[in-house]
């Protein structure tokens, strides 16, 4: 089975959700020109890291993002993994990703578990508690957000739950481009699955975000990679490759969980 992925690499206006929604609508309609099966957005695309005003600018219980994405799935004919958004639930702000199928149904949501202290996320954002797997077009998928990529335990949890593709919406900045590229490749190799990272571009103050959205295959080969400009990166996912790699290199069968016990 083969799927076409479109990664929408965009700049995000700080604390301006309405402007960002208009831009996302334009970019998703542009991405649909090549009729992708899946469209992926970056992290916090509705507000960026406007953390000091997050209570004023965030979504409320997923709205209006959910209504917007439900409509765009029907316009584009694609499944949409709607990056992540700042979202208020019961007065607490979360960094939450939503997934919609081609019919506009919400099939999954995930709130970021690991909060990024270098951008004060832990001061304003409530941590999620549950990993996320879901199915799109009959394919088992997993979802993490940005800083989660540094925690191999979470990616392995998704792989053990059956994920063949892991999506990583992000706002990953300079100077850590090498970390981004290395970790995406490492998570793909060690879990023998496709890893798709969609990263924003542009600036927030002195912080520059470098894009380089990437699809990595289960051998760790980079299938597609963007530059530092706004645009759409397309790539093909061949699910047969996941089974091939897992058959040739049976690391899951050779695991020794009993030897991994740790009390820390």
Image (spheres, rainbow, N blue to C red):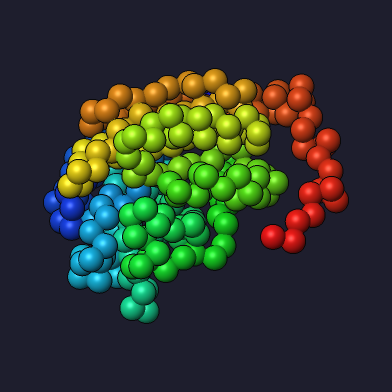
Q: Is residue 235 above or below residue 152?
A: above
Image quadrant where residue 7 sits = top left
Nearest the camera: 171 or 71?
Answer: 171
In the displayed structure, does residue 114 sit left or right of residue 91? right
Figure label count? 0
Residue 103, percent across and down?
41, 50
Q: x, y (%) of residue 257?
A: 81, 48
Residue 10: % across, % down: 25, 38
- Quarter of the picture containing the C terminus is bottom right
- Image vertical order of residue 49 relative to residue 194, above or below: below
Vertical order, 94 against 261 (above or below): below
Indicate the quadrant containing the N terminus: top left, top right, bottom left or bottom right: top right
Horizontal placement of 228 versus 243: left or right?
left
The foreground one among 170 and 182 is 182
Residue 209 visible in image: yes
**Left or right: 46 in relation to 251:** left
Residue 134: x, y in percent? 56, 51
Q: Is residue 18 above or below residue 237?
A: below
Q: Residue at x 49, y 57 (%)?
A: 114
Quadrant housing residue 95: bottom left
Looking at the image, which residue is at 70% across and 46% down?
160
């Amino acid at each position: 089975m083969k799927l076409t992925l479109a990664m929408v690499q965009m700049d995000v206006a700080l604390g301006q959700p309405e402007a960002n929604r208009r831009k996302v609508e334009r970019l998703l309609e542009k991405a649909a020109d090549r009729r992708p099966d899946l469209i992926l957005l970056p992290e916090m695309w509705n507000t960026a890291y406007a953390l000091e005003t997050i209570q004023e600018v965030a979504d409320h219980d997923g709205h209006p993002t959910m209504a917007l994405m439900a409509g765009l799935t029907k316009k584009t004919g694609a499944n949409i993994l709607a990056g992540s958004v700042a979202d208020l639930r019961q007065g607490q702000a979360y960094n939450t990703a939503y997934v919609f199928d081609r019919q506009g149904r919400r099939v999954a949501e995930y709130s970021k578990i690991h909060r990024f202290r270098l951008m004060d996320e832990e001061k304003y954002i409530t941590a999620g508690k549950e990993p996320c797997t879901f199915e799109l077009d009959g394919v088992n998928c997993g979802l993490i957000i940005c800083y989660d990529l540094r925690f191999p335990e979470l990616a392995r949890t998704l792989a053990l739950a059956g994920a063949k593709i892991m999506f990583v919406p992000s706002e990953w900045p300079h100077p850590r481009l090498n970390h981004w590229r290395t970790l995406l490749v490492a998570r793909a190799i060690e879990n023998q699955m496709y890893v798709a990272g969609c990263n924003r571009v542009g600036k927030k103050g002195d912080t520059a975000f470098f894009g380089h959205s990437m699809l990595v295959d289960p051998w760790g080969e980079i299938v597609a990679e963007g530059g530092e400009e706004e645009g759409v990166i397309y790539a093909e996912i061949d699910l047969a490759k996941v089974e091939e790699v897992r058959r040739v290199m049976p690391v899951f069968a050779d695991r020794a969980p009993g030897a991994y016990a740790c009390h820390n």
